[in-house]
Image (spheres, helix red, strand yellow):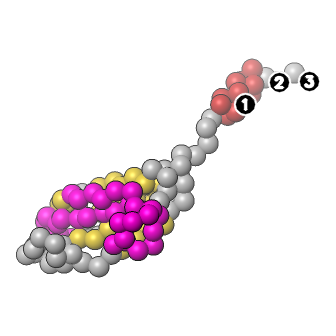
Amino acid sequence: MRVPGWLAAALVLGACSSGSSPSAKLVLNDPAWERINVQAVITTNSDCDNRGPGYVTTKEFTMTKGHTHEIVAPNAEIICWRHDANPDSPSPGNWSGWSKATLSPGQTAETDL
């Protein structure tokens, strides 16, 4: 049986594909506040405050209304995030409670703050 050239090429390219990425991505959206400070933690621990075994990194950034920010967990770890408890009058270290996402490798999820 003869295989058409384009089909053979597609099969070879498909075989060379490495599959899905082990990383996962969370896209945060700020639909409400003119300016808000956000803290994100990447960890394998279900306790977002735990900086022991399983902790990967902490990222702090500022978001503005109508914009998004991507957080990548390199090995699809848990992504936790929180923001200023009072975005209209922020106080250093005064955070909201944690929100968290457990994503699968290769997955991208989007959520509002």
Of callouts 3 and 1, the N-terminal one: 3
Q: Residues within 10 Å of mark 2 (few under 14, many from 20)?
A: few
**Quadrant of the drawing holding the N terminus:** top right
In the image, is 81 to the left or to the right of 44? left
For residue 46, above or below residue 19: below
Q: Which numbered tag is attached to residue 1?
A: 3
* Circle nearer the N terminus (1, 2): 2
Question: Image quadrant for the C terminus?
Answer: bottom left
Q: What is the CA distance from the residue labelled 1 to the residue labelled 2?
A: 10 Å
Q: Is residue 74 left or right of residue 10?
A: left
On screen, residue 90 above or below 65? below
Residue at position x 62%, y 35% in the image: 17
Identify which amino acid the numbered label 3 is placed on.
Met
Specify the amino acid type for callout 1.
Leu
Q: In this figure, which residue is indicated by the disc labeled 1?
A: 11
Front one among 22 and 107: 22
The span from disc 2 to disc 3 (Cα, nearest Å) is 7 Å
Q: Is 34 positioned to the left or the right of 48 in the image? A: left
Between residue 30 and residue 61, name the one nearer to us.
Answer: 61
Which range of residues does the magenta coloring cover?
A: 32-61
Nearer to us in this view, 41 or 86: 41
Q: Amino acid at mark 2?
A: Val
Residue 10 shows in the view = no
Q: Is label 3 in contact with label 1 (beta carbons under 8 Å)?
A: no
Q: In the rendered structure, are the residues bearing label 2 and label 3 in contact, judged by CB atoms less than 8 Å apart? A: yes
Question: To which quarter of the image does residue 37 belong?
Answer: bottom left
Please name the residue that numbered disc 2 is placed on.
Answer: 3
Of residues 23 and 28, the one drawn nearer to the viewer in this rendering: 23
Element type where label 1 sits in the image: helix
